[in-house]
Amino acid sequence: MLDRCSNPNSPAYASYGARGITVCERWRTYPNFICDVGRRPSKEYSIDRRDNDGNYEPGNVYWATRKQQARNRRSSRLITALGKTMTEAEWVEFTGIKQGTLSCRLNRYGWEPDRAMSTPVMSREEICYAAGIARKSKAKEMVA
């Protein structure tokens, strides 16, 4: 944390220190950091910032898992639908809709988020039936 924010030779400096992200003066002493943030719950956790453009300071950091950190990135897309705001990955998990399907609904088809999240996914057979298209069974396809 200190290195990536204050050492221009650090490989991560461009993403932290060069963007103006700093570590509060109090946390330059390890016991103060532990006093404010607490010990790492387990090796599964590392420090993360709630506001990715904010500094490492009280109120902006927490212990997070890799999954939590992956969803808290500058590149994460936040979507508001059904009265909730979550990342696209969280919506995929919440709705059970595949990521590709959700992405197509929002980007390719231009659906509003509420519609994209609440419209049930139809199987290929259901789509063909709804369109009045008779699908050949696999057995018939193999014989033909």
Image: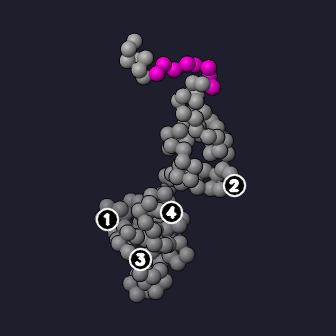
The mark found on residue 41 in the picture is 3
Q: Which mark is residue 83?
A: 2
Residue plotted at (49% across, 57% down): 71
Among the two numbered marks 3 and 1 on one chain, the one whose residue lies closer to the N terminus: 1
Q: CA distance from mark 2 to mark 4?
A: 24 Å
Residue at 41% of width from left, 17% of height from top? 141
**Disc 2 to disc 1, how far (Cα)?**
41 Å
Q: Position of residue 35 (x, y in %)?
A: 46, 86
Work out whether mark 2 precedes mark 4 in sequence or the reverse, and give the earlier one.
Answer: 4
Q: CA distance from mark 3 to mark 1?
A: 26 Å
Which residue is located at x 62 percent, y 40 percent? 120
The CA span between labels 3 and 2 is 32 Å
The kind of residue on which mark 3 rests is: Pro
Q: Earlier in the sequence, mark 4 or mark 1?
A: 1
Q: Dot 4: what SS?
A: loop
- Density class for disc 3 (Cα within 10 Å; few <14, some 14-19, many ≥20) is few
Quadrant the C terminus occupies? top left
Q: Which residues are magenta?
A: 130-137
From the viewer's perspective, is residue 130 above or below residue 7? above
- Residue with the mark numbered 1: 10
Is label 4 in contact with label 3 (beta carbons under 8 Å)? no
Q: What x and y, as percent, mark residue 106?
A: 59, 39
Measuring from the top left, give residue 3's x and y in whole percent: 34, 71
* 94 left or right, relative to 12: right
Q: Which residue is mark 4?
A: 52
Q: Quadrant of residue 133?
A: top right
| Front residue (pair 127, 138) | 138
Eye-nearest disc, 3 or 1: 3
2 or 1: tag closer to the N-terminus: 1
